[in-house]
Amino acid sequence: MPSTALRALARLIDRTFARVAAAAVDARTFDRALIARETSFWSDVEPAVAALAARPGTGRELLARRTLRWIAGHGEDRHAWAAEDPGTAGLLLPPRPEDPALPSWDTWGHIAPPWSQPLGEDARAALSPYDPADCRFLGLEAEFRRDRLDAALTVQLPRRYDAGERVRAGARLGIELEAVSELSFTSGSGPTGALTWHTGNGRVEVLAGEHGRLVAERAVLRIGDAFWHLSEPGRAAAAVTPRHHRGRRPEEWPLGPAFALGVPHHASSRLASALVRQALAGISRARGVERVDQRHILTLCRVFEGAGTELLAAGAQGGRAFRRLILRWVERGGEPLTDWFAGILHVNSRRGPTGAWARKLAVELTRRSGPRPPGPWTPPPESPPKLPRTAVLRLLSVDFDEHQHERSTAGATVQFAVPPTDGGGRRDGWDLVSVGIDGLDRLRLSPGAFAGPDRLEPLRRRKVSLESGSALALSWHDGRVPVAWTGWPTAVGRIRAVGPEPVVPIVPLPEERRRGATG
């Protein structure tokens, strides 16, 4: 029977895919924050797969235990995540004490402001190096997460201290609000004004000049200023903050990817590791509002369900067991992931019998997709948009920062949950639909926008709105253009449909799939 550490490592991988699948199964309760958090802990999954795939007799138990400690040893949040499994908690070292409300030293040797602190009366002193009365609002994001509405406001504040002649842009400030009860925002492109807030009666009220008002139960302040060490609070903090050397404890050495990957293991396990890594990377795109594809996430979770246990069993059997495991994953993926598997196997194939087998399989998968049309693909003629009759507003992300994205105007991304009985929705459940709008002229958002299922008006010449008293209104420069609700990303006029992107594109899409992606 595998050791305790090996089984714990396999359970963590299995738990991640299971939690992501549960969070993405219904578009009405799609939890983007949970998905991003789960996948962020596997930013480097190779050591875990290498431990599970190590040859018997090479110290798999020691490797698994040290890999667990390495995964959980990068902050209290990661330690708490790993310790949620009762069988794993006893294998971990005590977490390193951290306080995000205290200044710390960055990698450049400069004192950095506190990572986060509650937005209250004490936070006013933290903004003494800036001028909140003359700020520029860069972005607003509101998302309904399971049973509550969260929001985030990003602003740019002018500095009151001298940061140097070459520094022109102000410092960035982020305010994250949880359990929002009131939300209203009306603005054109590039809004400016004063930032103020009030606390009391168990809630926080944030006023964005004359443009908006947000009321929530909790709010957190995050300061992003690379030159904070030049301010008076930064100099004072540098004088009293000790420089801690985060050296490894004796029981932690050696750790990390170099140690794990140096242990002898089966050649085919590298291919399995690459597939798991790319699957988690594809799922992690949920943290970006423009790359959320619910169907793709659910497909990957279905294919790699129980991947940790399967990798552990394959490691005990031998190299050909990993080939059989990869073939099972390919069969589970079916036609939707044919190109995805082909691209990853082709890129990660190496010399030797395993590389030849991977290239042969990649070619076979490419043939299954059918013939490729010659020459570059051209979009079909414009057609009237097919909008769902009913939809639930899930997320609104507005970006007023034109300079950062080299645009002349602001942009927005809107996500809706579409029922299965309506056009564009999945037959087996609610689907998540995203629409991106460039050239944003004006935004009007009232609290009723996130009230629940609502009727969506047809896409007209200058606005998209919900019928509940025009709770959400967006207007943009160009006229009516077609919108692709699902499929691969397409750039059509000023409105861009948002969908999945190929991880390793080695061949163009078949003609029939391209038509489906834009119709």
Image (cartoon, grey):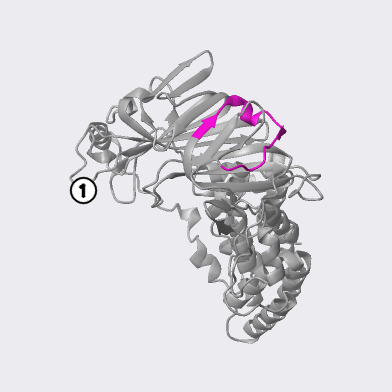
The one nearer the camera, 398 or 351, is: 398
Q: Is residue 258 above or below residue 221?
A: below
For the C terminus, give its image quadrant. bottom right
Residue 97 belongs to magenta span: no
Q: Amino acid at mark 1?
A: Arg
- Provide the residue designation for mark 1: 166
Tell me where residue 298 sits by quadrant.
bottom right
Against 218, is 161 above or below?
below
Q: Quadrant of residue 276?
A: bottom right
Q: Is residue 292 left or right of residue 22?
A: left
Viewer-side residue, 128 vs 376? 376
| Mark 1 element type | loop
Q: Establish if 346 lies above or below 411.
A: below
| Quadrant (top left, top right, bottom left, bottom right) of the N terminus | bottom right
Question: In the image, residue 117 lies at what x, y percent?
Answer: 43, 30
The answer to whether 458 appears left or right of 113 in the picture is right
Mark 1, Cα crowd under 10 Å, few <14 / some 14-19 / many 20+, is few
Question: With respect to residue 300, does 246 lie above or below?
Answer: above
The answer to whether residue 41 is visible is: no
Give the side of residue 290 with respect to residue 327, left or right: left
Q: In this picture, which residue range is highlighted in magenta?
A: 443-461
Percent coordinates x, y for residue 68 in the rendering: 59, 54
The residue at the point 71 percent across, 62 percent down is 516
| Residue 304 can be seen in this image | yes
How many numbered circles does the render carry? 1
